[in-house]
Every structure is written in structure tokens, then in C-alpha cells.
């Protein structure tokens, strides 16, 4: 533990991680995935999440073959039949609050887990340390949802298929295990960067950590029109007044402390 920092009880979570296939809305530029590609992506995401050594993991698949592949890896699996879900419903949003809530409630009806992390399977850039960063963004008790952002790359500012997040950074919130990471509060989400009015913006990384109360509140709140335009129910959460904090991550970020080194050595991130 670094000198001068005490253990922060707000960082002692019992998260339940849901790795879900076909979680987001298909975009016109997306290429349809074969069954083998989908299974490979699901297994790869499960391996990365498991190696983060954080919480219990459920794999939510959309086909029996996907579930069998994940189960062969040792995963606990559940199956969602997308045919039973109206595609106009917000189950098909990028973050899929209703689907995630339904999956979690099947597994944890008595709220043994205080935080739910939703991880889509179609993220080739997924790194185990992303989940560590999420927990730092969720450290303050006023935060209902945590998510991740990364720097925009060439062409992504103009690309309206890319969800962009405007953030105000907190200079007192540092992610100690990750060099160069930091924590801030989400101000807005837009696919059209011009609507962010020149605010400092980043690419939204669609991995979300929900406190159970925030997840339940979003599910009980009707979706908004702008939510469907932007493609994420985090818009609904923002408009409901739920505080969403973000952690900055990059693919090549240097990990300074491993999960094993952090276990039992949680630091005070400041409030």
C-alpha cells in the first residue's frame, strides 16, 4: 500500500459480471458474425474477464452452441432468447439495462451482489485491467454507474457510429494501478460531436458497472427518444439524474499493480 493511504471501504464490492453476446444494436457498418466467430468472441471475453480476478462471472449467450463453448471453459451460463424480445424495446440498446437486469435477477434474486458489470462479447480490445478501472470510477458512493472512455482515434470524431462522451475530470481521482488513467464525471453522450459544443470528448467504451439500485431505477424509467438516437440507455440514466463516472483507459496502458497485488490492499481514491 502506498504511504498515506488507508483502505477505502467503498471500494470493497461484491460484483457480478455478465459477459453477454449480441448485447448491442447492430450498426449498418457491422458485419454479421458467423456462429463460430460469435462463440470465439464470447469465449475470449470470458477469459479476459476471468483473468481480471474480480467477482463472479455469468455468460449470457443467445444460442445453445455458444453456451456449450463457454461452459467448456468453466463458465456458468444462462441463455437469452432474443426472439422473445421486441427489437424496438430497449433490451436492444448498447448497454442493455433491461436484459442485464433480467439475467441478474434470474441468478441473484436476493441481491447478494451489490454491483453488476455488463461486458459485451464483441470487444477485441478488451483488457482485464478495464474492470479494475471501473471499480475506481465507482468508488464514490454518490456514483450510480461507472463506465470507461478512451481517446478518439483518426476519423472517429466525424464518425456518427461512434458514441462520444463529454467528461469533466476530477484532479483528485487517480487510478493507481494504471499509468495515465484518471476518473471524471460524464456530462453527455452524443454520436454527433458537434452537439457536444467543443467540450473535451472521448470514445465511450461499452462496459458498464451498475449499482443495483441505479440499475433498478433505470429499468423502471421509460426510455427516451434521444436514448435511441444515441444508442445507449446511459442517456436515460443521465436524464434521470443518476451520476455516472468514467475512467480513462487505453489499449496499451501500463499496469502498475496486478489484481493479486491489489487484493486486500485497496487504496483511498479520494471523494
Image (spheres, rainbow, N blue to C red):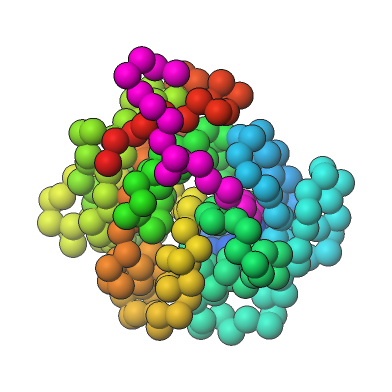
Residue drawn 47% across the image and 58% down it: 210
Q: Which residue is drawn at 65% across and 67% down?
A: 110
Residue 203 appearing in the image: no
Quick one: quadrant of the N terminus?
top left
Looking at the rendering, in which quadrant would you find the C terminus? top left
Residue 78 position in % (x across, y down): 76, 63
Observer-nearest of 63 and 74: 74
User: Image quadrant of residue 202?
Assistant: top left
State left or right for residue 156 relative to residue 36: left
Q: Residue 141 location, x and y as percent?
A: 36, 51
Viewer-nearest residue: 72 or 39: 72
Residue 2 drawn above or below residue 135:
above
Residue 17 as seen in the image, left or right of residue 2:
right
Looking at the image, residue 72 sits to the left or right of residue 205; the answer is: right
Residue 176 left/right relative to 184: right
Q: Where is residue 251 in the image (x, y as percent from the top left)?
A: 46, 31
Part of the protein shown in magenta? 1-19
Of 201 and 110, the residue lying toward us: 110
In the image, residue 16 lies in the stretch drawn in magenta: yes
Residue 81: image location, x then y, percent = 72, 75
Which residue is rendered at x = 27% and y = 68% of the image?
Answer: 241
Q: Residue at (68%, 83%) from the top-left corner?
A: 84
- 116, above or below 181, in the image: below
Would you say residue 46 is visible in this rendering?
A: yes
Is residue 149 found inside the magenta-colored segment of the image?
no
Residue extending furthest toward the top: 3
Amino acid at each position: 500500500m502506498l504511504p498515506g493511504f488507508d483502505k477505502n471501504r467503498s471500494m470493497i464490492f461484491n460484483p457480478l459480471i455478465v459477459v453477454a453476446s449480441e448485447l448491442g444494436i447492430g450498426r449498418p457498418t457491422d458485419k454479421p458474425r458467423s456462429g463460430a466467430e460469435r462463440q470465439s468472441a464470447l469465449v475470449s471475453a470470458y477469459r479476459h474477464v476471468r483473468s481480471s480476478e474480480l467477482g463472479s462471472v455469468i455468460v449470457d449467450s443467445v444460442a445453445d452452441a455458444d453456451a456449450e463453448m463457454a461452459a467448456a471453459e468453466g463458465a456458468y451460463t444462462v441463455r437469452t432468447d432474443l426472439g422473445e424480445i421486441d427489437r424496438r424495446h430497449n433490451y436492444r440498446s448498447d448497454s442493455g439495462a433491461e436484459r442485464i437486469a433480467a439475467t441478474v435477477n434470474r441468478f441473484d434474486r436476493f441481491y447478494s451482489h451489490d454491483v453488476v458489470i455488463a461486458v459485451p462479447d464483441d470487444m477485441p480490445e478488451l483488457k482485464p485491467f478495464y474492470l479494475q478501472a471501473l471499480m475506481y470510477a465507482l468508488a464514490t458512493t454518490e456514483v450510480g454507474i461507472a463506465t470507461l472512455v478512451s481517446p478518439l482515434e483518426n476519423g472517429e470524431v466525424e464518425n456518427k457510429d461512434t458514441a462520444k462522451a463529454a467528461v469533466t475530470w476530477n484532479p483528485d481521482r487517480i487510478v493507481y494501478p494504471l499509468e495515465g488513467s484518471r476518473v471524471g464525471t460524464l456530462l453527455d453522450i452524443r454520436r454527433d460531436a458537434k452537439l457536444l459544443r467543443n467540450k473535451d470528448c472521448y470514445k465511450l467504451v461499452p462496459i458498464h458497472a451498475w449499482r443495483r439500485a441505479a440499475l433498478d431505477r433505470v429499468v423502471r424509467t421509460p426510455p427516451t427518444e434521444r436514448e435511441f438516437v444515441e444508442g445507449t440507455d446511459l442517456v436515460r440514466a443521465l436524464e434521470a439524474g443518476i451520476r455516472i463516472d468514467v475512467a480513462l483507459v487505453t489499449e496499451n496502458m501500463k499496469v502498475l499493480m496486478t489484481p493479486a497485488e491489489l487484493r486486500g490492499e485497496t487504496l483511498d481514491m479520494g471523494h
